[in-house]
Amino acid sequence: MAEAAPSPSLPQSAAKPLSAPQKALRKLGLVRAIDLALHLPLRYEDETRITRLADAREGESVQIEGTVTGCEVVQRPRRQLLVTLDDGSATCTLRFFSFYPSHQKTLSVGARIRARGELRGGLLGWTMMHPSFRVASGELPDALTPVYPTSAGLPQAYLRRAVQAALQRADLSDTVPPEALAECPGLRLPGQGCPWSLREALQFLHHPAPDVPLAALEDRSHPAWQRLKAEELLAQQLSQYRAKQERAGLRAPALPSRPGGLHEQLLAALPFPLTAAQRRVGEEIARDLARTVPMHRLLQGDVGSGKTVVAALAAAVAIDAGWQCALMAPTEILAEQHFAKLVGWLQPLLEPLGQEVAWLTGSQKKKDRAEMLARIETGRAALVVGTHAVIQEQVRFHKLALAIIDEQHRFGVAQRLALREKMQGTGLEPHLLMMSATPIPRTLAMSYYADLDVSTIDELPPGRTPIVTKLLADSRRDELIERLRRQVAEGRQVYWVCPLIEDSEALDLSNATATHAELSAAMDGLVGADGSPVLVGLLHSRMPPAEKKAVMALFSQGVMGVLVSTTVIEVGVDVPNASLMVIEHAERFGLSQLHQLRGRVGRGTAASVCLLLYSPDENGRVSPTARERLRAMVETNDGFEIARRDLDIRGPGEFLGARQSGSPLLRFADLATDSHLLEWAREWAPRVLDQWPDLAHKHLDRWLGGKSDYLKA
């Protein structure tokens, strides 16, 4: 119910200036006619009927029609426009706190108006706050009115016209073979012979009849919704299988393991035996590396399961075959942890060969960086460990054969592609090993990783102690600090994690600097088990790299008793003597992040505890989502169960970090409720690709456009 909008036709030429609504359309990604056709309503408003005020009920959203009998601007208690509407059975006050002169003109005394909004009852009669309204003219619509997701500068009226025009222009011919549709569940209404076509489904969802049960539209169980979800899942599976086919046609260097080679030398030199799970996944990776088809494998394992040593063994195979390996991590702290371990394991074996493990980050001094770049280009650097600096243009590898990406979901797809492109010009692709401490639930793996081989380390090394997780309200902070004093006096070490490093107007949270000062005062005069004063350190992302390194070294060596930190210690930090983790404002963290942080303790033989310090609101409550996360942390240490619950709470987009990656998210399908459609799409995608390649190409273009290229990463 807005005023008439200008024509929504998109400009044909890039040179033609865009109007504000056209710019807003493009910002939403609504460029092609099919994009608009697939831009479905968030909800619907029923403007097909008029409700008499005498028949209305409190709290109902209704449309009323009547004559304006009063229209005035009042200043108290604040400036507002009050309009009285009489429908012949009763009166209703329309109240506007935001209004324009045009509103007053339309709502002048004597005008016949239709208004729609939620009715509230009071001592003075019915009221509607900020209702939508229009002049009462013309027939009532015969379908529900769609309300679309939109943005600033894009009125609903304009968007409705644009969508309607797109439905006429877009090619909505079926791209799913009839044979596949016949086996797809849920596409028919009871008694209906044929499944809904795409055109029928879209027309219906944009303009459903008023007698359709709103519940079936809202929970997306209606056959029209099922048709769209099936199409979307099929497009996603087609793109995954096509990427897998294309990858099968590429060539990578064959890297066979040889008896007595670097791989076996490293195994013999390790100060600990591998677990059965580590041996199993190591063999899976070695088999892949020996083939000329590029490996595309995800190595997943819970926090502390020993993924780095498996990566080191894979790197040893590549180096032994005469090639280079690159390992990229999302943060400098994590990259440095990897570097320290890999230097310890591999450097003694590489030195006799005239090779080394190299270190490359953006914070290096110019001279050191230039020296590393030269060693990488000549091949002296057999293994290069670093942050995103590894993929920068000036980094030229001599012979790169294996790319290892840790915490792969933290990188954008474009960054992963850039690392693979380091072999351009050779006609070969590097083998790709991605690692993640966030296990992938089965439904997510079926959907987003259909083209990926997955290896899972499903056991922890012996000697790890279970971590006890407890909730503690912030009101008991003083008790907690006293407990910390006792732990530290006994020689234990403590992490205290804060979500912010400076005050935020939006979030009333303690910052790391203030907490550091508070804990320093609390530990003042305290002596540790070795008789030396207890040090309290501070670590956050804005510190210079050298300072971060110095703080971490003091904590790792046991010199520092308490480390106050932001989430820079989320992954990779390994201090066996640290046995207590405090996470402040735990209700603000995501579930996988809480699990990662918890994994920083429990790495030695001492009993370890993770305390989730939460701050309820003034009513003593936390949000339902935060409550679910905290409950999951207390109930299980199992990373796979954590991952499953995290997917339930956050959905696949947030879980994968896919919003910043360019990877196409599922807009309509829900992996939790649509597994039957996913199974159908998985079964039919290879058959459609093989038997109906033209339809498959058209289907992918419709649903993904250029985004399917990202799936090659």
Image (cartoon, rainbow, N blue to C red):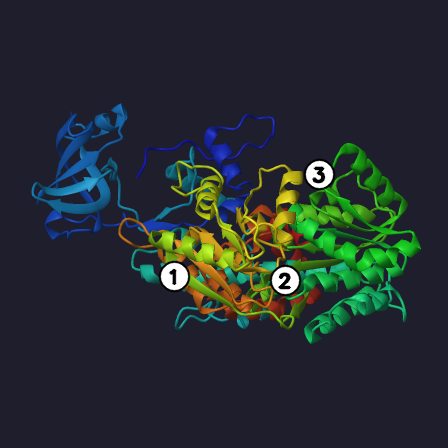
Q: Find residue 637 and report its horizontal and vertical position in percent.
A: 51, 68
The reply to whether the C-beta atoms of the residues labelled 2 and 1 are less than 8 Å apart is no
The reply to whether the C-beta atoms of the residues labelled 1 and 3 are less than 8 Å apart is no
Q: Find residue 318 and report its horizontal and vertical position in percent.
A: 84, 59
The reply to whether the C-beta atoms of the residues labelled 3 and 2 are less than 8 Å apart is no
Report whether 77 appears left or right of 197.
left
Task: Please tell me which residue is depicted at 22% across the width and 48% down the height of the picture.
Answer: 62
Q: Nearer the viewer, residue 702 or 128?
A: 128
**Separation of marks 3 and 2 at Cα, in angstroms:** 31 Å
Label of residue 219 in the image? 1
Q: At numbered mark 3, what does the secondary structure look like: helix, strand or loop? A: loop
Q: Find residue 287 and report its horizontal and vertical position in percent.
A: 80, 69
Disc 3: CA contacts within 10 A as few (<14), some (14-19) or many (>=20):
some
Task: Please tell me which residue is depicted at 48% across the width and 69% down the height of the picture.
Answer: 636
Q: At numbered mark 2, what does the secondary structure look like: helix, strand or loop? A: loop
Q: Which residue is mark 3?
A: 362
Q: Which residue is mark 2?
A: 449
Q: Amino acid at mark 1?
A: Asp
**Separation of marks 1 and 3 at Cα, in angstroms:** 48 Å
Q: Nearer the viewer, residue 697 or 365?
A: 365
Up/down of 82 relative to 515, above or below: above
Say if residue 482 shows up in the picture: yes
Q: Residue furthest right?
A: 353
Q: Nearer the viewer, mark 3 or mark 2?
A: 3
